[in-house]
Image: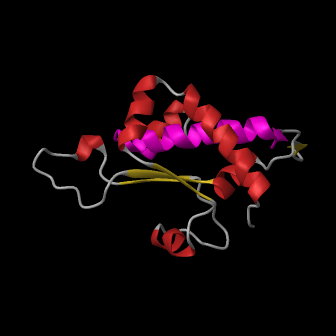
Amino acid sequence: MTIDDDERERFDELLEEELDRLPARLKRMLDETPLIVEDAPSRKLLRELGLDPDEDDLCGLHSGVALTERSVTDRPEIPDRIEIFRRGIIDEAGGWEPWVDDDGTELGGEQSVRREIRITILHEIGHHYGLSEEDLERLGYA
């Protein structure tokens, strides 16, 4: 599913608001580690990650070496960066329009998209600082 210009602008406004809400320390980290925003990951990237491009979504990805895994003698082979993907985040949030699933759970809507943006950013920053998927799940960022 593609993203049109209006949807991209709507998403990016929420993203900017969520970035503004981050603690100063995390904002400084993002000054050193680029945050790249794309509509969706490439099919090749999904396959490299062991995901099915026709079935799986990806909200974000940290590339590089976690701070906890670095040595002063290491030469970085891959520059650190954080990527987030609009389509995966919107889908994970349940879409732009609020709705209720068969269990009565409320899904979707702008607040859900906003929450998923924040969770994704914090999740990928967590990886930058060396947190595992299990650590992030325990913290509520998975």
The residue shown at (29%, 51%) is 65
The answer to if 10 sits in the magenta stretch is no
The residue shown at (63%, 60%) is 39
The residue shown at (57%, 29%) is 20
Residue at the farthest left position: 73
The residue shown at (76%, 53%) is 7
| Helix, strand or loop: magenta stretch | helix
| Quadrant position of residue 57 | bottom right
Question: x, y (%) of residue 91?
Answer: 72, 54
Confirm whether residue 142 shows in the render. no
Q: Which part of the image, by quadrant, shows the N terminus?
A: bottom right
Q: Nearer the viewer, residue 115 or 9?
A: 9
Q: Which part of the image, by quadrant, shows the C terminus?
A: top right
Question: x, y (%) of residue 40?
Answer: 61, 63
In the image, is residue 34 above or below residue 49?
above
| Quadrant position of residue 25 | top left
Q: Is residue 69 left or right of residue 82?
A: left
Q: How many marks?
A: 0
Q: The magenta stretch spans which residues?
A: 106-133
Q: Nearer the viewer, residue 92 or 81?
A: 81
Q: Is residue 134 left or right of residue 40?
A: left
| Quadrant position of residue 132 | top left
Question: x, y (%) of residue 54?
Answer: 67, 73
Q: Nearer the viewer, residue 100 or 20?
A: 20
Question: x, y (%) of residue 110?
Answer: 78, 39
What colouring style does the render use?
Answer: secondary structure
Q: Is residue 124 left or right of residue 14?
A: left
Confirm whether residue 18 shows in the render. yes
